[in-house]
Image (cartoon, helix red, strand yellow):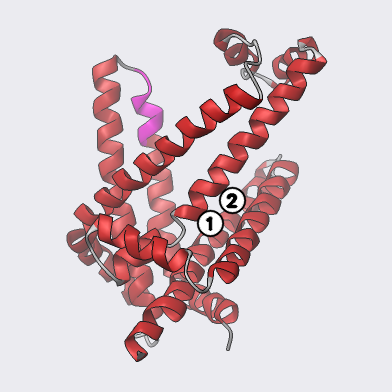
Amino acid sequence: MNIIQQSFNLTNKYIILATPLILFSLLSSLYILFSINGNLISLLFAAVLFILMLGAFMAGWFFMIREGLKDTFAENPNALLKEFPAGVGEFFLPVLGLMFTAGIISLVLLVISYYTGMHFIGDIGIKADDFSRAMESASALKAFLISLSDEQLLKLNAWNLLLMGTMAVTYFLIMFYPPALFYKNRNPLKAYFYSFKDLFGKKLFKNILLFLALFVSYFILSVLTALFGMNIITHFIFTLINFYYLIFVAVFVFNYYYTNFVKTDIIV
């Protein structure tokens, strides 16, 4: 059985993984909704608290995925949910370190992207206030785009491509970071070293193909969601599809990493 089929089977068997994901999504949405109104100090406090909440969720959820791949809960898949608190207790601090390290990597790449764009593309000549007002509605955005010159539109498209490319590179560089933390080393810096070495090792071409497949499939799903998720029924359906896709990708990446970079090390 190949890794894709195995990951689908595990996702379907342990669909209980959707419970923490959906609950966190709902609670975090409500939390953000009620936290956006306030002064700077309260917003900073809310941001820090949200990061802690996200860290706790990731610690428990990724731990559930790791334990689910062992398939020791085959007789009672719902029992996997009991592993969530254990994961929070065991990996909360390492996951916070992971988030901090990933944030630094993202920030560095964004800074490099900004200076690269300013050098090769140049300033678009759009005021921040005008762009903010344009995002208020579809009609405002349409009028805003019509008001731009051909040169500005060309630069705007170039900046969008640059930003998309930067995001893709960032995701690629941290693709194996979570499984490395949960399988190889709880030290965030050592875990990233392992993930980086495995990413650019002998299986680099295979890893690139994996990332491209995930990136393209996510792009297609995003387009389909935007096109068909316009009414309540289709929006609900595509929301469920997106949740299922996210669970499958997490299970698949952990399974791929374990099969190619953990199990082989154990055998050796």
Q: Is residue 119 above or below residue 172?
A: above
Q: Give the position of the C terminus as an image quadrant.
A: bottom left
Pointer 1 with pointer 2, Cβ within 8 A: yes
The circle drawn on residue 239 is: 2
Which amino acid lies under the numbered mark 1 shown in the image of this protein?
A: Phe
- Check if residue 168 falls in the magenta segment: no
Tell me the magenta residue range: 31-37
Give residue 145's quadrant in the image. Answer: top right
- Check if residue 33 falls in the magenta segment: yes
The circle drawn on residue 243 is: 1
User: In screen coordinates, is 240 left or right of 57?
Assistant: right
The secondary element bearing badge 1 is classed as helix
Residue at the image position 66 percent from the left and 43 percent from the top: 232
| Most foreground residue, 3 or 19 | 3
| Most foreground residue, 175 or 96 | 175
Q: Residues within 10 Å of mark 1 (few under 14, many from 20)?
A: some
Q: Can residue 224 be seen?
A: yes
Q: Residues within 10 Å of mark 2 (few under 14, many from 20)?
A: some
Q: Can residue 77 be seen?
A: no
The residues tagged by marks 1 and 2 sit, at their Cα atoms, a distance apart of 6 Å
The circle drawn on residue 141 is: none
Which amino acid lies under the numbered mark 2 shown in the image of this protein?
A: Thr
Residue at the image position 30 percent from the left and 44 percent from the top: 100
